[in-house]
Image: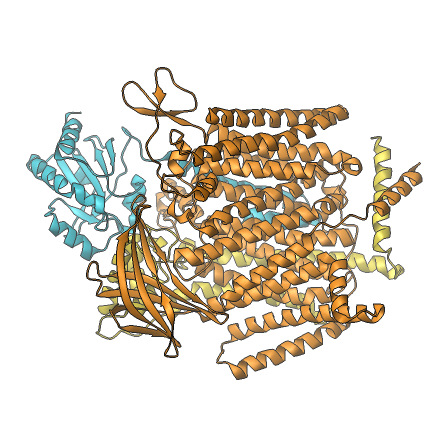
Chain colours: A yellow, B cyan, C orange
């Protein structure tokens, strides 16, 4: 990486971040399954859907592994709906309508909920920009200093001088 | 609201950006605190208060149709939150039904079953099993339970004719007499 | 009697804290060192006092003193003694006392140093520590008193009170309610104390930072004084998080180690600021830069630590980890507001005195890369904070919908769930970028580093890692860009780190004529912080391998089996042999299945996945049967079964490849922290002479 490329790297990093968020939003859409066969859906098919859901009774435990009776019933409901030929997205929509937004593992990227996907990448990009600006400024200052003298005082000296300065300042303040 | 974190960056820049950055950082920090404060108040306030206006709601019934504020107007309303997966709910199911049959013909008492986070299939099995005939419906989007700030099921709220909360029962009723006494008191008020 | 003694100790400690705070400030303002010394003695006194209080609680817990509310709520007769002792942190009041006790221990240890050189810090370090301690004591005494007892009134009802109300007699229930079942696990016994240790030891660097701000001695002295504290704090915090993960993996039965539960995220937050602080503190030491930034990071770390505790204990976040709802919310909140405002105001006030003295000379210098590392950590923090507050925000914004009914369809006040999928996808690339930096940064030099010098150092490890990834492509069926990229990153960082060790050791062995291994040992001994850091990096890479394994390659399947039927997943399969359901002494109903595990058709042994149902709390708990190897974990869950006949049972099985590297990496990581943090004697004579020289110069 050359010196000039570094800002570019930052930019790419920022884009990657934004990109990764775009992915999150599309998570529900990408798993659209073809219409299932008439046979009873297997446990694995049910779990694949349940994995992205949470029931309000046992907070923070994903539906596919939650051991409570309520969650068992929910899984059976998913099985019923899948057997009726519903798509995965249909099931999510039905559950949201019945039990509210919080059944989904991540808020659907619509309306106010877009905020959750937009805010972090924007803020992170802003943070990168700010730091990049800061570094550029510091570097400009640094070049100005080092242009004259190649040698900077060695570290122990630095510390020594800092201490000395400190002591002097203290003396000036009179404590 | 990650702003509490965003602030450092702002504060680093404000060296150059002037007082604006610093002001912005403070605004962000205060905004975060405000949101936490709102939530904290909500957490602390507990259940809805007796003798205050009870939340209004519309219940969509399993058998079709709706019951809204208009149908509840001027009646004593017994709102029972239940679920088919809830074992303690079964203890009071028969008593609630008997109480409903006792008051049904009067016309000024309404029993409503709000089915919390349940599947329709199981709910219907449960209603059949206990022969429940008073209006029952799902708590769509859990909005009714949120309005009543319930802490679990079963939980029962008795609302007076004036629409104020008359009584709150957490857990199952222990006897038919208990329900009748309370509803009579609400009617007499 | 014992209860009164413990309560007395708590009250006296609070008074001592208040006295110490006052004395320190008075002594500093009036320039009367006697008062400051007195404040320091007050600080030292808190530890023995809180020891008395803690021993009092433990005595009550061990002796079945069920007349005490706390004892009754966390122990029962059937519990073994060691669990009774650990019940000290099994509930809100006890854990607050435990927290304060650790806090007093650490603050006292920090106070015991030789203060001659840093006299001006002393009063403020004492003030910050004592104020923190006093806050927790107020919580305990005012809201969560562990010594409250039951009293029977003449009318037959039972009340709880600290002191005997008139006309009542002491009431002793026969048995207690017992410890929360989730806490009866070895991992859970050590997990909270580790987190508490991490939290309380973070108070020390914060106290010194605030002292530096107040006194205006804003050079890097405060960082030098506390760097070891910070490292230990970081070690405990990391250890607490890792143990929590292990516990979740062993007990919670969802095939994972980290569920991005709100409380887990809350505990991660201080770690996300403490880690960049460790790194950027180094820059301040070496280059006198980023002073504002370091101050901000330590303030944030402290505030996030208090906030994490607050979120867990106030009931604002609901979670498996949350304590029962409690009245301490508002005062906790007030304290957070106070610390945040006071410390940020102090920072604003000293802003100009904290100007960077060093300058940035190269984009590729180590300080520049460290800064990027910091930004990445902050980015992860932003994601986590946002995910944590988003559900609260959506609920709180419901108010807007209530005020303006036209907007009600947007601001519904509906609670949202922010699950693992959000955190994983959002932070994944950021973690990867951090891993890359971990590889590059150690190769770059302080101050000046050019693309050429860096390239020279980097080409060999890059080549080695590319060969490695080619080998993976040829030898295994791992495909997919994400997986390959992630594995390459791990190999790259490993190669860089080992290469650096090797190069330095060879150089040293040439220069000193010692053999390679001896040189390596001496090298690590001479610059422990640096090489300890490298060992930590290696540990992180190994952990990353484990995380990649479980996140990307985890497979699972579930099916109902009749007795004798088998279910396969990859090269493994299980056979359902039997199932027994029985009640235990400690009030559980256990359903325990026996399954035989086969790999490639060969019998490996039996596993016993089970479901415990706790009658008291009405909660089921799924405990997996796990077979571990270096390669993978075979993880079996009992999902459901036919009662009584037990003819069929449903099992869920996971294959978690490489997951044990996570635990192995964690061990290396801890070892590295020990290497880096082990006390070294300060080269005091040199400093002293320097100081003398300074004094001379001044004179």
- Which image quarter: residue C458? bottom right
Q: Residue at x 64, y 37 (%)?
A: C107
- Which image quarter: residue C625? bottom left
As drawn, the residue found furthest toward the top would be C166
Where is residue C419 shown, x and y percent of the image? 42, 57
Work out whether residue A161 or residue C575 is closer to the camera in this orientation and state it. Answer: C575
Q: Residue at x 17, y 47 (%)?
A: B136
- Which image quarter: residue C463? bottom right
As drawn, the residue found furthest toward the left would be B105
Is residue A136 visible to the viewer in this orientation of the structure?
A: no
Q: Taking C286 as reference, is C494 left or right? A: left
Q: Taking B55 as reference, is A129 left or right? A: right
Q: Taking C223 as reference, is B150 left or right? A: left
Q: Is residue C532 above or below residue B132?
A: below
Is residue C422 visible to the viewer in this orientation of the structure?
A: yes
Where is residue C336 shown, x and y percent of the image? 55, 37
């Amino acid at each position: 990486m050359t010196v000039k490329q570094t800002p570019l790297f930052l930019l790419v990093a920022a884009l990657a971040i934004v990109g990764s968020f775009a992915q999150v939003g599309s998570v529900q859409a990408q798993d659209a399954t073809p219409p299932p066969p008439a046979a009873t859906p297997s446990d694995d098919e049910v779990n694949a859907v349940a994995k992205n859901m949470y029931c309000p009774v046992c907070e923070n435990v994903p539906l596919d592994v939650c051991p409570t009776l309520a969650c068992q019933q929910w899984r059976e409901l998913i099985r019923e709906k899948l057997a009726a030929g519903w798509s995965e997205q249909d099931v999510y929509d039905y559950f949201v309508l019945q039990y509210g937004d919080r059944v989904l593992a991540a808020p659907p990227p619509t309306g106010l909920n877009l905020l959750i996907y937009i805010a972090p990448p924007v803020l992170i990009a802003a943070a990168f920009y700010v730091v990049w600006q800061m570094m550029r400024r510091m570097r400009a200052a640094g070049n100005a200093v080092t242009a004259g003298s190649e040698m900077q005082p060695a570290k122990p000296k630095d510390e020594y001088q800092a201490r000395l300065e400190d002591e002097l300042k203290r003396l000036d303040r009179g404590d | 609201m990650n702003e509490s974190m965003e602030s450092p960056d702002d504060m680093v820049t404000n060296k150059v950006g002037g007082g604006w950055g610093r002001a912005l950082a403070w605004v962000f920090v205060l905004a975060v605190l405000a949101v936490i404060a709102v939530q904290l108040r909500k957490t602390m306030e507990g259940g809805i208060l007796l003798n205050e206006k009870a939340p209004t709601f519309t219940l969509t019934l399993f058998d079709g149709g709706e019951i809204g504020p208009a149908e509840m107007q001027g009646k004593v309303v017994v709102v029972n939150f239940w679920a088919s997966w809830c074992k303690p709910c079964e203890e009071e199911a028969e008593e609630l039904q008997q109480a409903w049959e006792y008051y049904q013909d009067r016309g000024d008492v309404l029993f409503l079953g709000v089915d919390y986070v349940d599947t329709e299939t199981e709910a219907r099995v449960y209603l059949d099993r206990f022969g429940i005939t008073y209006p029952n419906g799902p708590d769509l989007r859990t909005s009714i339970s949120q309005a009543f700030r319930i802490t679990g099921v079963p939980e029962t709220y008795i609302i007076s004719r004036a629409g104020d909360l008359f009584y709150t029962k957490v857990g199952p009723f222990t006897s038919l007499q208990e329900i009748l006494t309370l509803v009579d008191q609400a009617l007499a008020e | 009697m014992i209860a009164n003694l413990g309560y007395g100790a708590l009250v006296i400690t609070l008074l001592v804290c208040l006295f110490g705070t006052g004395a320190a400030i008075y002594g500093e303002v009036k320039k009367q060192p006697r008062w400051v010394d007195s404040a320091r003695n007050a600080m030292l006194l808190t530890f023995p006092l809180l020891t008395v209080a803690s021993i009092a609680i433990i005595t009550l817990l061990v002796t079945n003193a069920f007349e005490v509310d706390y004892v009754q709520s966390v122990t029962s007769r059937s519990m073994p003694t060691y669990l009774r002792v650990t019940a000290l942190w099994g509930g809100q009041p006890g854990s607050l006392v435990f927290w304060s006790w650790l806090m007093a221990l650490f603050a006292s240890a920090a106070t015991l140093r030789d203060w001659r050189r840093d006299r001006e810090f002393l009063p403020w370090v004492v003030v910050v520590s004592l104020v923190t301690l006093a806050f927790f004591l107020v919580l305990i005494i005012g809201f969560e008193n562990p010594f409250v007892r039951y009293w029977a009134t003449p009318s037959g009802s039972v009340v709880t009170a600290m002191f005997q109300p008139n006309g009542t007699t002491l009431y002793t229930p026969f048995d207690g309610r017992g410890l929360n079942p989730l806490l009866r696990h070895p991992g859970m016994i050590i997990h909270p104390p580790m987190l508490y240790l991490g939290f309380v030891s973070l108070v020390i660097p914060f106290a010194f930072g605030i002292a530096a701000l107040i006194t205006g001695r804003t050079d890097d002295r405060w960082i030098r004084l506390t760097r070891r504290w910070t490292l230990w704090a970081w070690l405990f915090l990391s250890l607490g998080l890792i143990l929590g993960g292990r516990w979740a993996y062993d007990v919670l039965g969802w095939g994972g180690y980290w569920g991005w539960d709100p409380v887990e995220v809350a505990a991660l937050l201080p770690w996300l600021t403490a880690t960049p602080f460790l790194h950027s503190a180094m820059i301040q030491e070496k280059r006198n830069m980023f002073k504002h930034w370091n101050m901000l990071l330590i303030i944030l770390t402290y505030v996030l630590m208090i906030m994490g505790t607050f979120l867990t204990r106030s009931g604002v976040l609901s979670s498996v980890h949350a304590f029962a709802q409690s009245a301490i919310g508002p005062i906790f909140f007030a304290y957070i507001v106070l610390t945040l405002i006071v410390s940020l105001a102090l920072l604003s006030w000293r802003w100009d005195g904290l100007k960077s003295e060093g300058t940035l000379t190269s984009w590729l210098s180590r300080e520049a890369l460290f800064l990027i590392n910091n930004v990445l950590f902050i980015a992860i923090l932003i994601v986590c904070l946002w995910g944590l507050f988003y559900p609260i925000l959506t609920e709180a914004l419901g108010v807007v919908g209530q005020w303006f009914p036209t907007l009600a369809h947007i601001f519904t006040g509906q609670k949202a769930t922010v699950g693992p999928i959000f955190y994983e996808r959002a932070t994944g690339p950021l973690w990867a970028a951090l891993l890359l930096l971990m590889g590059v940064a150690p190769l770059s030099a302080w101050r000046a580093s050019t693309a050429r010098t860096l390239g020279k150092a980097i080409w060999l490890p890059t080549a080695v890692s590319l060969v490695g990834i080619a080998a993976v492509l040829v030898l295994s069926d791992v495909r997919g860009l994400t997986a390959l990229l992630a594995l390459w990153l791990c190999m790259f960082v490993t190669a860089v780190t080992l290469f650096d060790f090797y190069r330095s050791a060879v150089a040293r062995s040439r220069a000193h004529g010692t053999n390679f291994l001896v040189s390596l040992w001496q090298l690590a001994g001479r610059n422990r912080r640096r090489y300890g850091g490298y060992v930590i990096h290696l540990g992180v890479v190994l952990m990353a391998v484990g995380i990649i394994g479980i996140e990307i390659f985890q497979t699972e399947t579930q099916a109902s089996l009749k007795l004798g039927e088998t279910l396969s997943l990859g090269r493994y399969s299980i056979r359902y042999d039997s199932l027994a359901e029985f009640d235990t002494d400690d009030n559980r109903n256990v359903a325990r299945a026996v399954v035989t595990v086969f790999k490639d058709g060969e019998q490996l042994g039996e596993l016993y996945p089970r479901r415990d149902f706790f009658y008291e709390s009405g909660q089921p708990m799924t405990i997996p049967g796990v077979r571990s190897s270096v390669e993978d974990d075979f993880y079996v869950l009992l999902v459901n079964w036919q009662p009584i006949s037990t003819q069929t049972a449903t099992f869920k099985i996971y294959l978690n490849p490489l997951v044990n590297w996570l635990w192995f990496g964690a061990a290396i990581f801890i070892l590295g922290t020990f290497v880096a943090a082990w006390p070294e004697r300060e080269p005091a004579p040199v400093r002293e002479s320097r100081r003398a020289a300074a004094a001379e110069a001044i004179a």
